[in-house]
Amino acid sequence: MTTKYIFISLPEDAGEGLKPAVGDNGTVLPFQIPNFKIGTLDALVQQADDLTKLEAACEGLVSRVSDSLKTLLDGNEDKINQQKTVNDKPTDNYLRSFSWNKVRYRADKPIAELVDSLQKEMVTIDNDLKGKLNQYNGVKNNLATLERKQTGNLATKSLTPIVDPSVLITDSEYLETHLIAVPTNVKKDFLKTYENISPMVVPRSAYEVAKDDEFTLFATTTFKKHSSEFQQKCRENKWTPRPYKYVEGGKEEEKREFERVQKEEKKVWGEALRLSRTGWSESVMIWAHLMALRVFVESVLRYGLPLEYTPNVIVTTSKASQKVKDSLDKTFSHLGGNAFGRDKRGRITKDDAALSSEMAAAGFGENEYTAYVYYEIEL
């Protein structure tokens, strides 16, 4: 089960009912929010809309960072959880003891400036992480290609350490040697037919160079003017022509290149892991600060001035969260006023047409609107 964090704000005179309502289904903790500079009502409404969109974007960023950690650590949950820290403490500890970072985000700044600052930080984290992951994937793919050349079958692997240059005709004006990887199960068919699949194939020129569990590598000779036709006929017969040119010192050079890319892959992997770890810390921290702003702005819009509200965070599980929500709805339905008709289980009654139309106009579905400030995130 995943942990769910419910951010709730209630009028001060209703706050005492919160812990009894939650009961054994979660832990109620204070959610420390400073008093921000409040602008006009129109500005608050716009900020509430901006924060809704930004919080959804931040959730997506946290998810992408989590996916990058899974990829880099091959899905090892223990190792992944070790990397998921915020300010060098477990994520759960950070959210349970959250306090606004007044040094990084001065609370005396306008809310719009704080929102803009958080958004810019998100974009920077996202771009940096994407860039590093793209670099890592490029190096990883390069290494995989080199590994296939080292460990693949004779149809794909490098021929440099396999082919003795003495089997190749390199000094003839008319003749050319071709290396053909033939599936071992059709080796006999190849030997019977290769001389006749195109003109001017040198008779009995097929020479077995190497073999593995899947393929046998043959060297065959043709006249140069019919080389292309011979290679095409080989492909049609499911025999694989292997382009190869002997280079002095090529074997050693391939080994050095493989070792270089191997070291580079480890280096970039470490950089990507550190950036993902930092990305998790930063993005979760931004998410928590966005939730603080959302709770504050919505509390002002809901409960008005002077500021007399109690913000809390409820730590629960995905399984128990619905029980918490049902109990909260039942306990605090009266905060919606006379227009808030509810049945004995605290649900909005269907015959309240006025309320339903108001909710629809405000963009809320019946299951989304509450009589109190309520947001949740899941990690």
Image: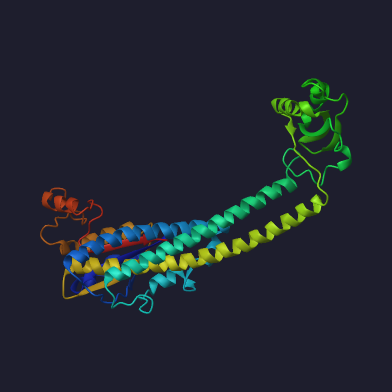
Q: How is the image coloured?
A: rainbow
Quarter of the image where one finds residue 16: bottom left
- The residue under the point 23% across, 65% down is 298
Q: Is residue 37 left or right of residue 170?
A: left
> Which is more toward the observer, 272 or 27?
272
- The residue under the point 49% across, 56% down is 67
Quarter of the image where one finds residue 167: top right
Q: Quadrant of the N terminus?
A: bottom left
Q: Is residue 228 visible?
A: yes
Q: Position of residue 314 (x, y in %)?
A: 33, 67
Q: Is residue 240 left or right of residue 277?
A: right
Q: Is residue 19 visible?
A: no
Q: Position of residue 334 (x, y in %)?
A: 16, 63
- The residue under the point 23% across, 62% down is 46
> Which is more toward the observer, 299 or 251?
251
Q: Is residue 74 left or right of residue 369?
A: right
Vertical placement of residue 290 versus 177, above or below: below
- The residue under the point 14% across, 50% down is 357
Q: Position of residue 99 (x, y in %)?
A: 36, 76
Q: Quadrant of the C terminus?
A: bottom left
Q: Is residue 204 left or right of residue 67?
A: right
Q: Position of residue 236 (x, y in %)?
A: 69, 25
Looking at the rendered structure, the number of numbered marks drawn on it comes to: 0
Vertical placement of residue 140 versus 78, above or below: above
Vertical placement of residue 210 versus 23, above or below: above
Quarter of the image where one finds residue 125: bottom left
